[in-house]
C-alpha cells in the first residue's frame, strides 16, 4: 500500500509539471515555434529552473515571475524575438557568423577551451558527421539562430551541428536549416 501511495504521488507530481510546461508556453512563450520552446525548456534548463521555483511562481504569478526573477527575465529577453514559424534554408558563409561565434567555435575545435575536453568534443563532432548525411545541404534537424540582417549574432541551438557543417565543407558556404529569430 505504501508503494502504491508513493507511486501515485510521483504520478501527480509528473502530471503537475506536464501541465506546468503547457502553462509556461501559453502564458509566457507563445510567440516561439514549438521546436524552439522545446529546446529552451528541455535542453537549455528552463524546465529544471521553473520546477525548482514552482512555489515562488504560484505565489507571485507567472507573468510577474518572468519579469522580476533575474534568470527568468534574462531567458525571456534572450528569446523575445520575431521568429520564423517554420524552419528556413539559409545560405551561409563562415564569415556570416559573428566574430564572437567564430572565435568560440574555433577555440573549442582547437582544444583551447579547458571547459570542453577535446576527446569528448571530437567524438561529438564525429558522431554528428556520421549520423547527419544532409548536413551543410539544408537537409538536417534545424538549428536555432538569432540574426541581424545576413549576420548570425547567436547560435542559440545547434552550435555543434553548425560547426560540423562548416567543417564538412572545409569552411566553404553551406546551406543550413534553421529557425531564425530577429530583434522586434
Image (tube, grey):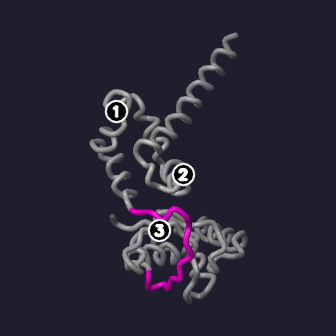
Distance, label 2 to label 1, CA atoms, is 22 Å
Q: Which residues are magenta?
A: 82-96
- SS assignment at label 3: strand
As rendered, which of 87 and 45 lies closer to the eye? 87
User: Disc 3 marks which residue?
Assistant: 180
As rendered, which of 99 and 154 lies closer to the eye? 154
| Whether residue 114 is visible | no
Instruction: Answer few, some or many: residues within 10 Å of disc 2's Cα (few below 14, many 20 plus, some between 14 and 19).
Output: some
Q: Is residue 1 above or below residue 172?
A: above
Residue 53 in the image: state x and y as whole percent.
Answer: 40, 34
Q: Compare marks 2 and 1 and give the one earlier in the sequence.
A: 2
Q: Is residue 66 left or right of residue 123?
A: left
Instruction: Answer few, some or many: residues within 10 Å of disc 3's Cα (few below 14, many 20 plus, some between 14 and 19).
Output: many
User: Disc 2 marks which residue?
Assistant: 38
Q: Is residue 133 above or below residue 35?
A: below
The quadrant of the rendering that contains the C terminus is bottom left
Give me the residue at 61% from left, 68% from top: 119
Q: Compare marks 3 and 2 and give the one earlier in the sequence.
A: 2
- SS assignment at label 2: helix
- SS assignment at label 1: loop
Give me the residue at 72% from left, 72% from top: 130
Amino acid at each position: 500500500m505504501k508503494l502504491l501511495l508513493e507511486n501515485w504521488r510521483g504520478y501527480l507530481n509528473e502530471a503537475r509539471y506536464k501541465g506546468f510546461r503547457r502553462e509556461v508556453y501559453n502564458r509566457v512563450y507563445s510567440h516561439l515555434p514549438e521546436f524552439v520552446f522545446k529546446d529552451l525548456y528541455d535542453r537549455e534548463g528552463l524546465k529544471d529552473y521553473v520546477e525548482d521555483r514552482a512555489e515562488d511562481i504560484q505565489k507571485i504569478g507567472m507573468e510577474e515571475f518572468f519579469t522580476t526573477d533575474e534568470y527568468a527575465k534574462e531567458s525571456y529577453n534572450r528569446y523575445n524575438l520575431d521568429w520564423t514559424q517554420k524552419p528556413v534554408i539559409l545560405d551561409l558563409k563562415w564569415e556570416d557568423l559573428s566574430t564572437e561565434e567564430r572565435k568560440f567555435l574555433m577555440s573549442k575545435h582547437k582544444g583551447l577551451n579547458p571547459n570542453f575536453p577535446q576527446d569528448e568534443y571530437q567524438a561529438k563532432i564525429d558522431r554528428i558527421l556520421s549520423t547527419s548525411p544532409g548536413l551543410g545541404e539544408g537537409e538536417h534537424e534545424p538549428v536555432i539562430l538569432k540574426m541581424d540582417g545576413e549576420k548570425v549574432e547567436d547560435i542559440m541551438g545547434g552550435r555543434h551541428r553548425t560547426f560540423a557543417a562548416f567543417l564538412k565543407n572545409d569552411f566553404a558556404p553551406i546551406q543550413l536549416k534553421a529557425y531564425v529569430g530577429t530583434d522586434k
